[in-house]
């Protein structure tokens, strides 16, 4: 995800090129209106019988024809349009681009394939593709643990907007924004893959080396011994595209938390201790410790990961909360000196999404935080005639991200909240059959990124989850 996607000017995609006139949708018969928007089978990047069977089975449980149609388009979008299966040194090697940007984000690629894990046990080819994602992420981390995005072709030059950045660019890196969650997501994917399949083949010496590098990088970014080696500056009129203080970010007091240069939105942090990413790191480090012990028989790595998780969790309790008239909540960012940013951003990890990432250690604290972030008390929460939800500086004022509505539903136990989110998500599609990055609060046809695979797949995950557990909410 990049700050250079333009509001109100969707980028053309192979999907959109076949469906240019969205205005016709409302005039067509329901059968035609809800015709599949997937690429033709011969044009799909990857085909999975297990995924296709799952789509058909799930759609049978969805009584709302528009939700069933959206699910059929969105759930397979990553496999249909963004994966590039291959091999490297005789082993699976899978690139996963974000959609309209020809690069692989460690975060996005992990999230894009996550919903397919439950199906991997019934499809050897799908399991191999997922193994390839893990192996490619391993290669990327070993190139540079501070990079957030890598080129599909590791011999290609970086993304155009990154080529003059003042930072330590390395061959294969697409963009070098240090984002703590970029090292957490590959652990989440690896742990989920191992638990779902029992397959340990991806977790070889290279993966072990990469995981040691993950832990050591997080340790360095606790900044107990100074700012560390990472710095980043970019010439841009957009303030969130560069870091202050000679590229090291605003100062922090080393209290045990892990500093991050940028948020999951790829926007610069105001205060480097990004709370949802630190909470995510606690979960990820414990997952890594489990795998280091059970899969690698590396108790040194397991103990290091456990110890770091415990230290970060303790520091979060002490430094990452804030008092409000409604009670104590999680802050979004802190600096260890007492300064706090109270807000939330749509991109995950977010405060709203903590339970989704299994990173919410205090239910009451989360409940208060949730009420705060899903309200006008959060400066990046917007409500209009087309819906309500959380946005962020990345696309600016009054731009709601459907991702926030998906996470709102995924983390809710309230039927009314979930139904409300589903209604807004249907409207946000604007008849396109897909989810978008963001849309104007009063007009869903004014949206950004027509081809954003993470949002599509996350919507598919939401519908699949509801179909399995609360199918009554998916009826017309």
Image (cartoon, rainbow, N blue to C red):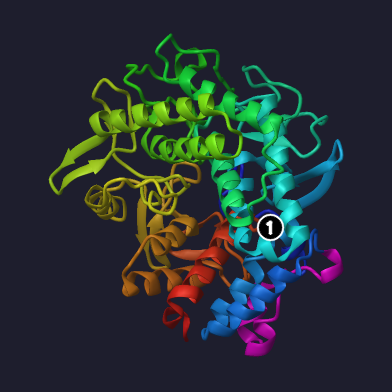
Farthest top residue? 225
Pick the front one: 468 or 293: 293
Q: Is residue 295 magenta?
A: no
Q: Residue tagged by mark 1?
A: 78
Q: Is residue 25 magenta?
A: yes
What residue is drawn where x is 67% and y is 38%? 203
Write the residue at 34% across / 17% down: 254
- Residue 131 coordinates in the image, percent (x, y): 71, 47
Residue 161 visible at all: no
Mark 1, secondary structure of its residue: helix
Q: What residue appears at the point 64 percent right and 55 percent down from the top-left corner?
A: 197
- Name which quarter of the figure residue 148 lies in: top right
What segment is highlighted magenta in the picture? 19-43
Q: x and y percent of residue 11 in the render? A: 68, 53
Residue 270, by quadrant, is top left
The residue carrying pointer 1 sits among few (fewer than 14), some (14 to 19) or many (20 or more) residues within 10 Å by Cα, namely many
Residue 242 relative to residue 17: left or right:
left
Q: Is residue 161 above or below residue 127?
A: above
Q: Residue furthest left?
A: 325
Number of numbered discs overlaid on the protein picture: 1
Quadrant position of residue 46? bottom right
Q: Nearer the viewer, residue 336 or 448?
A: 336
x, y percentage for residue 236? Answer: 57, 27
Vertical order, 231 against 176 (above or below): above
> Which image quadrant: the N terminus?
top right
């Amino acid at each position: 995800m990049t700050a250079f996607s333009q509001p109100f000017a969707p980028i053309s995609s192979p999907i959109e090129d076949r469906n240019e006139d969205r205005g016709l949708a409302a005039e067509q018969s329901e059968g035609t209106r809800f015709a599949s928007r997937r690429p033709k089978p011969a044009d799909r990047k990857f085909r999975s019988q297990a995924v296709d069977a799952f789509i058909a089975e799930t759609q049978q449980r969805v009584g709302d024809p528009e939700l069933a149609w959206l699910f059929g388009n969105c759930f397979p979008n990553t496999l249909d349009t963004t994966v590039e299966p291959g091999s490297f040194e005789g082993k699976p090697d899978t690139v996963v681009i974000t959609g309209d940007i020809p690069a692989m984000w460690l975060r996005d690629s992990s999230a894009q394939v996550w919903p397919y894990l439950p199906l991997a046990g019934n499809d050897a080819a799908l399991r191999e593709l997922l193994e390839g994602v893990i192996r490619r992420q391993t290669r990327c981390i070993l190139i540079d643990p501070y990079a957030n995005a890598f080129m599909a072709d590791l011999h290609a030059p970086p993304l155009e907007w990154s080529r003059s950045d003042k930072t330590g660019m390395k061959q294969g890196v697409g963009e070098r924004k240090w984002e703590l969650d970029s090292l957490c997501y590959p652990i989440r994917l690896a742990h989920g893959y191992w638990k779902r399949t029992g397959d340990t083949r991806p977790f070889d010496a290279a993966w072990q080396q990469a995981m040691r590098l993950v832990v050591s990088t997080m340790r360095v970014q606790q900044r107990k011994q100074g700012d560390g080696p990472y710095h980043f500056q970019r010439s841009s009129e957009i303030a969130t595209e560069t870091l202050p203080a000679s590229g090291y970010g605003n100062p922090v007091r080393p209290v045990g938390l892990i500093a991050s240069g940028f948020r999951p939105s790829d926007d610069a942090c105001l205060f480097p201790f990004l709370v949802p990413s630190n909470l995510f790191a606690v979960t990820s480090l414990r997952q890594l410790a489990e795998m280091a012990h059970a899969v690698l028989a590396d108790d040194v790595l397991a103990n290091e990961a456990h110890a770091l998780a415990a230290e970060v969790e303790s520091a979060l309790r002490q430094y990452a909360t804030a008092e409000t008239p409604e009670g104590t909540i999680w802050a979004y960012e802190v600096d260890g000196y007492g300064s706090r940013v109270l807000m939330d951003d749509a991109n995950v990890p977010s405060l709203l999404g903590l339970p989704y990432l299994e990173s919410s250690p205090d239910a009451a604290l989360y409940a208060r935080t949730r009420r705060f972030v899903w309200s006008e008390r959060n400066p990046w929460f917007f409500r209009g005639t087309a819906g309500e939800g959380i946005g962020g500086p990345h696309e600016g004022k009054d731009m709601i991200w459907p991702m926030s509505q998906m996470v709102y539903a995924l983390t809710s136990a309230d039927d009314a909240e979930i139904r409300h989110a589903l209604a807004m998500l249907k409207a946000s599609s604007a008849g396109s059959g897909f989810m978008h990055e963001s849309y104007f609060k009063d007009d869903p046809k004014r949206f950004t990124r027509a081809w954003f695979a993470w949002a599509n797949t996350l919507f598919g995950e939401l519908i699949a989850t509801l179909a399995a557990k609360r199918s009554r909410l998916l009826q017309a």
